[in-house]
Image (cartoon, rainbow, N blue to C red):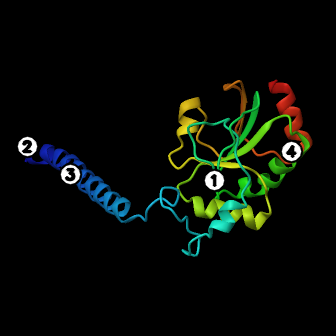
C-alpha cells in the first residue's frame, strides 16, 4: 500500500508535465500556422492597404511629408527621403493601434511646426503601414514618419518596448528617451530642452 500511494504524486507531476508540453506544442503550431497565413507586409508590397483592405492610392502616399535622412536604415512612410539631416532629431515611436499615440501625434506635429530647427518625425513601429497612413490622414497630421515593421530602430538604440516613446538624437547619438505620452507642446519643449 505504501509503495502505491507514494507513486501517485509522481504520476500526477508527470501528467502535469506531459499536459504542459502538449499545450505548448499546440500553441506553437497554431502561432506558426497563423504567421504563415498572415497577409504580406504593406510596406514591402507596391500598394499599401487601408484598414478596409483597399489599396491606398499613390496620391495619398505622395501627399505624405518627406522624411529627412535622420534615420537612414528605415523607409519613409509614403514619401521619399530628403538627402540632408539636421544635427538634432526628435523621433516619436508610435503605432496606429495605440490610443495614447493617437492623442499625442497632433502635439508632436505642432511641435515640429514650431521647431523647424529639429528633424521631427514619427517612427511607426508596426507592420501595417496602410493603417499608419490612413490614421495620419484622418487626424490631419502632417508629420513625416518612418516605417519600422520590425522595430529595428528601438532594438538598435535599446529603447524600451512601450508606446509612445520619444527619442532625442544629436548627431545620431541618443541624448534622451522619454517612454511616456506628452500632453502639450510646452511639456515636450521642456523635455527636449533638458535633453540638449
- Identify the residue under disc 1: 77
- Residue lying at 29% horizontally and 53% vertically, measured from the top left: 24
Proximity of marks 4 and 2: CB atoms separated by less than 8 Å:
no
Q: Quadrant of residue 22?
A: bottom left
Residue 112: x and y, percent?
84, 44
- Residue lying at 68% horizontally and 49% vertically, measured from the top left: 145
Q: Secondary structure at mark 3?
A: helix
Proximity of marks 2 and 3: CB atoms separated by less than 8 Å:
no
First reached walking from the N terminus: tag 4 or tag 1: 1
Q: Nearer the viewer, residue 150 or 30?
A: 150
Q: Nearer the viewer, residue 97 or 142?
A: 142
Q: Nearer the viewer, mark 2 or mark 1?
A: 1
Q: Residue furthest front?
A: 83
Question: Of the numbered discs in the image, which one, if any, rests on residue 3?
Answer: 2
Residue 148, compared with residue 192, is above or below; it is below
Q: Secondary structure at mark 1?
A: loop
- Residue lying at 65% horizontally and 62% vertically, measured from the top left: 61
Mark 3 burial class by Cα count in 10 Å: few <14, some 14-19, many 20+: few
Residue 177, compared with residue 48, is above or below; it is above
Residue 13: x and y, percent?
22, 46
Query: Horizontal placement of 33 versus 101: left or right?
Result: left
Residue 58: x and y, percent?
63, 66
Measure the alpha-carbon separation of dots 3 and 1.
47 Å
- Identify the residue under disc 4: 111
- Identify the residue under disc 3: 18
First reached walking from the N terminus: tag 2 or tag 1: 2
Measure the alpha-carbon separation of dots 4 and 2.
75 Å
Q: Secondary structure at mark 4?
A: helix
Amino acid at each position: 500500500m505504501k509503495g502505491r500511494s507514494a507513486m501517485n504524486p509522481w504520476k500526477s507531476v508527470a501528467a502535469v508535465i506531459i499536459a504542459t508540453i502538449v499545450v505548448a506544442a499546440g500553441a506553437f503550431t497554431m502561432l506558426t500556422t497563423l504567421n504563415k497565413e498572415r497577409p504580406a507586409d504593406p510596406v514591402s508590397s507596391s500598394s499599401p492597404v487601408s484598414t478596409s483592405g483597399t489599396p491606398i492610392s499613390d496620391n495619398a502616399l505622395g501627399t505624405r511629408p518627406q522624411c529627412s535622412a535622420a534615420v537612414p536604415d528605415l523607409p519613409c512612410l509614403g514619401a521619399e527621403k530628403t538627402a540632408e539631416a539636421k544635427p538634432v532629431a526628435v523621433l516619436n515611436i508610435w503605432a496606429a493601434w495605440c490610443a495614447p499615440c493617437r492623442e499625442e501625434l497632433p502635439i508632436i506635429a505642432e511641435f515640429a511646426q514650431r521647431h523647424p530647427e529639429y528633424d521631427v518625425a514619427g517612427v511607426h513601429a508596426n507592420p501595417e503601414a496602410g493603417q499608419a497612413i490612413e490614421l495620419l490622414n484622418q487626424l490631419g497630421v502632417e508629420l513625416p514618419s518612418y516605417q519600422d515593421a520590425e522595430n529595428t530602430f528601438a532594438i538598435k538604440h535599446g529603447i524600451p518596448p512601450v508606446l509612445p516613446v520619444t527619442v532625442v538624437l544629436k548627431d545620431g547619438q541618443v541624448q534622451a528617451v522619454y517612454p511616456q505620452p506628452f500632453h502639450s507642446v510646452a511639456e515636450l519643449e521642456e523635455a527636449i530642452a533638458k535633453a540638449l
